[in-house]
Image (tube, rainbow, N blue to C red):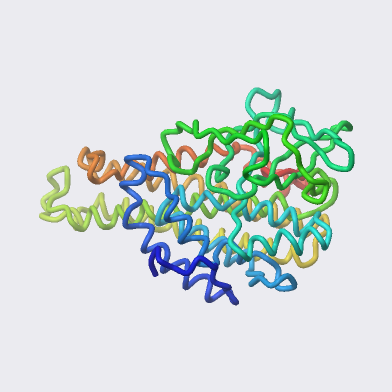
Amino acid sequence: MNASLNPAPALIGSDAEALEIANALAEVFRAGSAQRDRERLLPHAELELFSRSGLWAISVPKAFGGAGVSSVTLARVIARIAQADGSLGQIPQNHFYALEVLRINGNVEQQRRLYGEVLQGVRFGNALAELGTKTSQDRTTRLIADGENFRIDGRKFYATGALYAQRIPTLAVDEQGIGHLAFVPRHAPGLEIIDDWSGFGQRTTGSGSVLLQQVPVAAADVVPFQASFERPTTVGPFAQLLHAAIDIGIARAAYEDTLSFVRNSSRPWIDSGVDKASDDPLTLKAIGRLAIHLHAAEALLERAGEHLDRAQAAPDAASVAAASIAVAEARAIGTEASLALSSKLLELAGSRGTLAEHNLDRHWRNARTHTLHDPVRWKYHAVGNYYLNDALPPRRGTI
């Protein structure tokens, strides 16, 4: 598999095929990941390869020509790509999120048209979050009626993937304060994407600003958004499952690099009477703890995907709550695992691990940056409240 693929995306037909292609792509992406992070080389060529592989269309329902893969498979795909390159694993997260909103709230005509674009290789970015609002749920970007259509005014940040997308799904509120998701074409007049993301991790995600100044948008490109949380739907746990997959993919990458580094180290860092670092009892204990933590996180990610699949098939208050809690558990342990594994890698590698040619610190920077996406402490609260008090978690995109 190489960058000279036919411009027409492949059509993936099954979960097994999606996983096979993800594994092949991950090997390609892994080769240059350290350099891309070190030099902030934006992955335009890699994203073209990613798109042409057909993986960006695997959640399109079978009724509209897609593979309609399970949530379990989608999480595995994202985790595998994130293992190869944390930024590349995060870039499609909001693309799939927008497709889930479209599946739940879009009308048949919107679904047929927008799913069709995705099958042809169109990538969706996002313009959801804002800076400077009182809470993370507040939005000041306005959807303004303009005859039969609309205009959008506002400024967004953390717009992961917008830099590489052909459409920018934008969250805006109408005159009644109701939120909608507008699938804005990338080159719409008044739309500006600003590459001002300067985070020390996830450096090539393109998570900068989107400026919208009286941007025209057709009514047919506007899908209800707030309605996703006014009834039991899987929009929230779906988003969080993919975030958990990103963290756990980064954790797996740190684990594999830890094993490689220790195996190739001649002596332990403290004189313990052994000649190889891989025979040092303290190192063995550390590796054992890391392996258990990682395997637990991966198992909870799969369990969460299974819960989400059941909720998508039969959404109600109970099934959606169970999915949200299962995903929150995976997200919580994924946060712990990615931070623990990436930190221990640096500890065991010593100062050599921070050398530019190794760039092993990128795993910790990526994990620390991405795990700050939403507060994991509230996930523990929601999980405890669910099991102890039978309290259903709130319906929002962060749980």
Looking at the picture, how far across and down is residue 157, in whole percent? Answer: 60, 33
- The picture quadrant where one finds residue 176 is top right
How many numbered circles are shown? 0
Foreground residue, 133 or 125? 125
Work out which residue is located at the far front of the displayed protein and give it: 189
Q: Where, quadrant-wise, is the N terminus in this rendering? A: bottom left
User: Residue placed at 73% from the left, 70% from the top?
Assistant: 64
User: Residue placed at 28% from the left, 57% from the top?
Assistant: 259
Looking at the picture, how far across and down is residue 3, in whole percent? Answer: 40, 63
Foreground residue, 125 or 253? 125
Q: Where, quadrant-wise, is the C terminus in this rendering? A: top right
User: Residue placed at 74% from the left, 31% from the top?
Assistant: 214
In this rendering, would 119 be left or right of 320? left
Foreground residue, 263 or 57? 57
Q: Examine the rendered structure and indicate whether residue 200 appears above or below residue 93.
A: above
In this rendering, would 270 be left or right of 122? left
Looking at the picture, how far across and down is residue 307, in whole percent? Answer: 68, 62
Foreground residue, 366 or 220? 220
User: Residue placed at 61% from the left, 54% from the top?
Assistant: 241
Looking at the picture, how far across and down is residue 71, in whole percent? Answer: 63, 64
